Image (cartoon, helix red, strand yellow):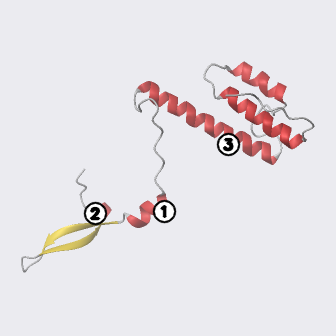
Amino acid sequence: EGKAIEVRNMSRKVKKILAIENFQKVIQSNTVDKSVKAKLKKRLGLPPARNIGSKETKAAMKRLDRRMKAIKELRFLWKRGILKRGQKIPSMPDKQVELSESQTVSTMVRARDGLLQLLPRRRSSCRRPW
């Protein structure tokens, strides 16, 4: 995507960040096999595993692995037809919000005098319409 940025006299930290970004571009393509990735890691001066290196390198490699896992899962779902091409994986619902906001459901109950009342019931104890 455009011309590569040329950087001269950069520090070790900047070199490492650029190496990780270059590695990320390569592994996101579907065509590269494991041995090429390992050779590229070595050439860029990156650690062979994600749990080796400085704290920053470990964190960056972990983020990269998680991103690659999500991309791989997405491609699998597209291939199986579970998701349409171009669709993304839906975000996970927030557990705290789910627990606090959806504990009760309003149910209609007829009182003794014949009027309808809205009573809150715990979601687990009432039958779901779906």
Could you tell me which secondary element the residue under label 2 belongs to? helix
Residue at x 74% of width, y 30% of height = 23
Which residue carries the number 3 mark? Answer: 63
Residue 40: % across, % down: 78, 24
Q: Among all residues in the image, which is located at the extreme right?
A: 9
Q: Residue at x 17, y 68 (%)?
A: 108
Mark 2 closeness class: few <14, some 14–19, many ≥20 residues within 10 Å = few
Residue at image position (76%, 35%) is 20
- Pointer 1 residue: 96
Task: Give how far apart the Cα atoms at labels 2 and 3 are.
Answer: 41 Å
Along the viewing direction, whichever of 103 and 32 lies nearer the viewer = 32
Q: Is mark 1 in CB contact (under 8 Å) with mark 2?
A: no
Give the Cα distance between marks 1 and 3. 24 Å
Image: 117 above or below 127? below
Q: Secondary structure at mark 1?
A: helix
Name the residue tied to disc 2: 125
* Nearer-N-terminus badge (1/3): 3
- Label 3 residue SS: helix
Q: Camera-side residue: 89 or 65?
A: 89
Q: Nearer the viewer, residue 60 or 15?
A: 15
